[in-house]
Image: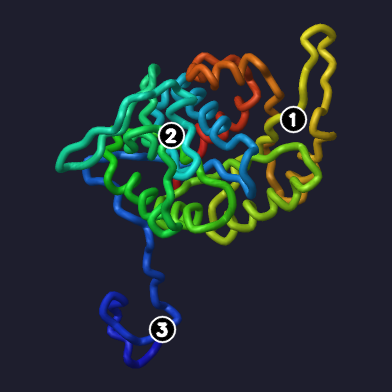
Amino acid sequence: MSEECTHNCSTCSANCSSRKAESLLAPLNELSSVKKVIAVVSGKGGVGKSLVTSLLAVLSQRNGVQTAIMDADITGPSIPKTFGVTAKAEGDEHGIFPAKTTTGIEMISINMLLENETDPVVWRGPVIAGTVKQFWTDVIWNDVDTMFIDCPPGTGDVPLTIFQSIPVDGIVIVTSPQDLVSMIVGKAVKMAQLMNIPILGIVENMSYFECPDCGKRHHIYGESHIEEVAAKYGIEKIARIPINSKLAGAVDRGMVELFEGDWLDEISETISNLKKD
């Protein structure tokens, strides 16, 4: 400890080894309550993060857990359409009110703030990251037990803002059954490690197609390497989602809350049992 230390890190200029790191966490809206936050991430786009986010949220709500979704993919939002939510977000001097799905899942998405859902968001990275932070600070989340954040792909401004500004308790990584899967997962894993956030599971989307006539599984996008990748990075929970026309149809019609399938049950249970530090 420096001789110049005043023992008050907020005012002291001494560069002590005991200096406390300044927290970058953004304050939650004073009228909000969010107990647990799970981020759904991937090293690349188009692998189904929004689908996995939606399915995990539906399972959580079915289990009697008050659930919310923050759609942090500002330039490619899809959560409202997946749930058939067309309402625009409203607010007052205290903050913004999220919309609710048929089963009561709270959600916020940039599409709920645009005049038309097809309007493009042509913003630079810092503005997009700031909008995501406002989804945490300005939205009034009503006694939420578990919030799922649908992150944009990659490891850029927005995922970094989420991990630094929001107290994320764990992440779920989504990937697809292709040869570059190890590299994609590796990027997400290393970012989680840098941020000291536990990885709760890995989901392989579009893993296989099961013939409705004979029941045989066909690996349309190649053989799965998910076990090897999970073992390489010490990820215990693995889930596979098939190419399923009924599931795709439910998503396209905004009826994802009616889906049937046990693909994510184990990861959902892991999230449910996760204890905050």
Q: Mark 2 sits on what residue?
A: 118
Q: Which residue is mark 3?
A: 16
Q: Position of residue 244 (x, y in %)?
A: 68, 19
Q: Residues within 10 Å of mark 3 (few under 14, many from 20)?
A: some
**CA distance separating discs 2 and 3:** 52 Å
Give the residue displayed 46% in from the left and 31% down from the top. Answer: 79
Residue in the foreground of this view, choosing between 207 and 168: 207
Query: Which sits in the foreground, 120 or 126?
Result: 120
Left or right? Give the position of 58 relative to 247: left
The location of residue 233, given as percent across then percent down, is 72, 51
Please say if 200 is above or below 263. Answer: below
In which quadrant is the N terminus drawn? Answer: bottom left
Going by the numbered disc 2, the residue's amino acid type is Thr
Kind of element beneath mark 2: loop
Res. 275 in view: no
Q: Residue at x 81, y 7 (%)?
A: 213
In the image, taking residue 98 as reference, residue 204 lies left or right, namely: right
The residue where tag 1 is placed is: 207
| Total residue callouts | 3
Nearer-N-terminus badge (2/3)? 3
User: Which residue extends farthest bottom?
Assistant: 3
Q: CA distance from mark 2 to mark 1?
A: 30 Å
Q: Earlier in the sequence, mark 2 or mark 1?
A: 2
